Image (cartoon, helix red, strand yellow):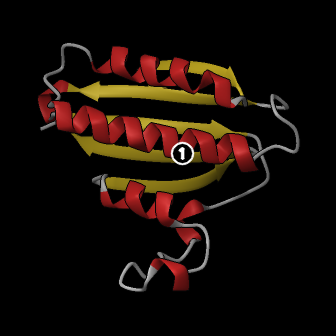
Amino acid sequence: MKTITVPSDKGRLYDVQEFVKDCLSGCGASEKTIQQLELIVEEIFVNIVSYAYNHPSEGDISISCSVEEHLMRVTLTFTDAGPEFDPLSIEDPDVKMKMEDRSVGGLGLFLVKKNVDGITYRRDNGRNVLLIEKRLS
């Protein structure tokens, strides 16, 4: 398992994406899977930066990446010390409604949930922990 910890700053998104790509290098992940993971990482990271802390760079975000090649699975764990927030408690948007009739928000998390094989949230020692599992093939 590899871990990177960065300030809560949207400007660090590239560093986080590069970290995940480096973690995946040589594991046989398809290009489609890598692109899905880039979208997932961007959505989760930007949401944490935008909502977990009162001011930019107020806190840190840790991202852990574990690749189990024999299972062809990657696990990403996002951890922050912001107020307790379970993103899985957000109701999925009604994607059958016209866009102009939908309330704002929730579509990014909906897309994350649709592009992963497992997602769990827990509060641990005053920290939000979001664990994402994705098959690599």
Q: Nearer the viewer, residue 30 or 123?
A: 30
In this rendering, is residue 105 above or below 130?
below
Q: Residue at x 73, y 31 (%)?
A: 8
- Dot 1, crowdedness within 10 Å: few (<14), some or many (≥20)? some
* Percent coordinates x, y for residue 107 in the rendering: 48, 65
Q: Residue at x 76, y 40 (%)?
A: 81
In this rendering, is residue 88 above or below 14?
below
* Percent coordinates x, y for residue 5 in the rendering: 63, 21
Answer with the quarter of the image where residue 80 lies.
top right
In this rendering, is residue 57 above or below 110?
above
Q: Residue at x 35, y 84 (%)?
A: 96
* Percent coordinates x, y for residue 48 in the rendering: 66, 44
Q: Nearer the viewer, residue 37 or 70?
A: 37
Left or right, residue 67 beside residue 17: left
Q: Residue at x 74, y 50 (%)?
A: 51
What kind of residue is marked 1?
Ile
Left or right, residue 32 beside residue 64: left
Q: Secondary structure at mark 1?
A: helix
Q: Nearer the viewer, residue 53 or 99?
A: 99
Looking at the rendered image, the quarter that the N terminus falls into is: top left
Left or right, residue 3 beside residue 115: right
* Percent coordinates x, y for residue 117 in the rendering: 27, 53
Report which residue position mark 1 lands on: 44
Answer with the quarter of the image where residue 98 lies.
bottom left
Looking at the rendered image, the quarter that the C terminus falls into is: top left
The residue most toward the front is 100
